[in-house]
Amino acid sequence: MIEDLKHLRNKIDAIDDELLELINTRAQLAQEVGRQKSGAVYRPERESQIFTRLQQHNHGPLSQIQIQQLFTEIISACRALEDPFTVAYLGPEGTFSEEAVNKRFGKAVNALPSRSIDEVFRQVESGTANFGVIPVENSTEGAVGRTMDLLLQTPLLICGELELAIHQCLMAKQVDLSKIRKIYSHPQSFAQCHSWLIENLHHLQGIECINAASNADAARLAANDEHAAAIASKKAAEVFGLMLCACNIQDNSNNTTRFLIIGSQAVAPSGRDKTSLVMATSNRPGAVHELLAPLARHQVSMTRLESRPSRANLWDYVFFVDIEGHQQDENVALALQSLRHNATFFKLLGSYPLA
Ligand SMILES: O=C(O)C(=O)C[C@]1(C(=O)O)C=C[C@@H](O)C=C1
């Protein structure tokens, strides 16, 4: 038995040695690619192709998610060797936006916490950060208005998207809930955990629910008060040294937020892409129908249509549209040409790999 174990561990050691060698050879090749290519280090289309291929080739026992996480870190380390870059996100440390940065870029990146969505755009526009990560819609709360308004004005492009399951946790300095007198969180998180709070904290009448600027801020406040708890991410509990009293307390188990990656580079086709644009048309019967007609004519699927006040004239709207395909695909290029021709306002926000 002991001999069997020893033998198995020797085999693992031998594989680790091989992996070590292979990972370092991969890193050298990435460095060489870095020297040969011009422009940005981060190539979302290439990374998307790598993950699609790995998923097709993976036969387990590791799950697709585990493979994705392992290779995200390998690629992250390779990218950092080529040229370390900075990603701005809606901070502070411990927010779901930070989790989104890590999910997409891995740990080997300079993550720059920003105070607001506006500041994320500014950091990237000024070149302080190479990319930005911003929330664009939540499955229960809908579109993030500020992100949409800023996309309308910015010279930046959308370079990618990712979805993050939002798991809310209750955390405090101690796990005895009877000592809790107040709970801090962001209003959206309180709303997402409404039923759980009512069912589980019977003495809720005596508990004050206090709004915080972000979940991470709520955790910071709870860390300074024996009688306070916070609703925030697991990461926030780690960052602020809090104990987890309950996990996954959001009422909707599929609660998901979609994030965008913004930057100044146009992304090449990956083979599985999406294109985002914003348009306006005149205010007359049938105008929106006519505006969108070229999509059907050129067999382009629309995956999202969202209207927002234009902020120029009263009751004037702009339409945010997501379509399947890359702007360099022939049918998409033809459809875009007609849309541009029909619209009173037209702005291409970018083509990028599907999440
Ligand atoms: O293929 C490239 O352009 C690389 O730089 C290599 C690599 C990788 O590690 O595979 C790293 C960064 C890019 O975002 C894409 C891929």
Image: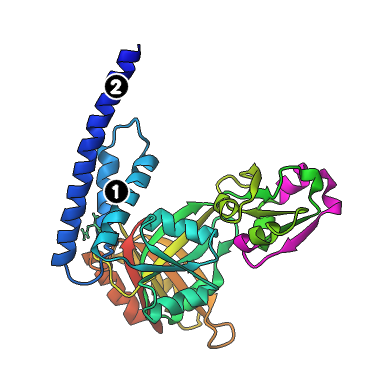
Label 2, ligand 1: CB separation under 8 Å: no
Query: Is the residue under label 1 in contact with that under label 2 (CB below 8 Å)?
Result: no
User: How many residues crowd mark 2 within 10 Å: few (<14), some (14–19), many (20+)?
Assistant: few
The stretch of residues the image draws in magenta is 194-217
Most frequent secondary structure within the magenta stretch: helix
Please state which of residues 65 and 285 is positioned toward the viewer in this rendering: 65
The three-letter code of the residue at mark 1 reads Phe
Q: Residue at x 30, y 73 (%)?
A: 336
The three-letter code of the residue at mark 2 reads Leu
Seen in the picture, residue 97 relative to 39 is either above or below; the reply is above
Residue extending furthest toward the top: 1
Please state which of residues 22 and 142 is positioned toward the viewer in this rendering: 22
Quadrant for the C terminus in the image: bottom left
Q: Position of residue 253 (x, y in %)?
A: 58, 44
Instruction: Give the alpha-carbon distance from disc 2 to disc 1, as whole Å.
Output: 30 Å
Magenta segment: does it hold 198?
yes
Q: Residue at x 32, y 63 (%)?
A: 352
Q: Residue at x 33, y 79 (%)?
A: 340
Quadrant for the N terminus in the image: top left
Please state which of residues 328 and 204 is positioned toward the viewer in this rendering: 204
Residue 1's tag is none
Image quadrant where residue 335 sits? bottom left
Q: Secondary structure at mark 2?
A: helix
Image quadrant where residue 44 sits? bottom left
Residue 8's tag is 2
